[in-house]
Amino acid sequence: MLAATKHTLHLKKLAILAKQNVNNQLSLKRKKDIFFTDKHYLALLLLISLFCTFAEGGGYVANWFGNLPKGDTLLDQLEKFKEEEILDQFQRLFERQFRSIFQTRWRKPKVILAIDMTDKPTYSRWKKTNRNIVGGKPKASTCHFFRFATVQIADKKNPITLYAMHCKKGNTSLS
């Protein structure tokens, strides 16, 4: 029980930090706030990313935290953006966070570079035809995965993801 409460406290701290540091630097293309404001949509986005829940699971998790919009309305808001606009917003956010972490130090920090491959299981019916789904060692009752490569730097306190890339069937080997 003690470990569960520590884990819960850690998740709450992460959610508060993300809300304070990330959500106030992002914006949506909304003309008016009738029932939900930008902060409601960004809180839902935070919950979905924090708990890795999508589709029906996102609505289920959002119900735990009070009155938040449904996933479909969030998707409607996000579809107003072009891919370049989203990338620009997150690039500016990343640059601000990177500067705030590493700029206030007297000497250059010692960091390590980590390249990691992560497999996320999928049970899609299009696993044989979809180029984004790769095969692998059986895990979680499936042999089909979405594979992501990430490049991170880390010092004693701050791991920062520099780049994340989705690997397709042709470029999944590490060589």
Image (tube, rainbow, N blue to C red):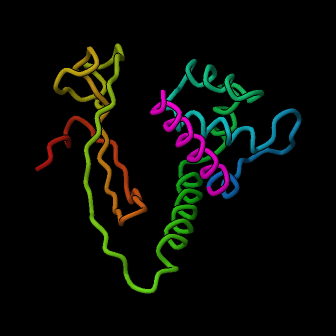
Looking at the image, which residue is at 35% across and 13% down?
Answer: 125
Is 15 left or right of 91, judged from the image as shown? right
Residues in magenta, as a range: 1-21
Q: Quick check: 28 above or below 130?
A: below
Determine the image quadrant of residue 120: top left
**Magenta-highlighted stretch: main secondary structure?**
helix
89 drawn magenta: no
Is 162 left or right of 8, judged from the image as shown? left
Q: Nearer the viewer, residue 83 or 158?
A: 158
Is 63 left or right of 47, judged from the image as shown? right
Looking at the image, which residue is at 10% across and 50% down?
Answer: 175
Q: Residue furthest front?
A: 2
Measured from the top left, where is residue 49 in percent x and y? 53, 37
Looking at the image, which residue is at 76% across and 44% down?
Answer: 38
Q: Nearer the viewer, residue 15 or 49?
A: 15
Measured from the top left, where is residue 147 in percent x and y? 29, 36
Looking at the image, which residue is at 14% across and 43% down?
Answer: 173
Determine the image quadrant of residue 43: top right
Is 115 left or right of 157, judged from the image as shown? left
Q: Residue furthest bottom?
A: 106
Measured from the top left, where is residue 105 in percent x and y? 47, 81
10 drawn magenta: yes
Q: Quick check: 168 above or below 59?
A: below
Measured from the top left, where is residue 82 in percent x and y? 59, 48
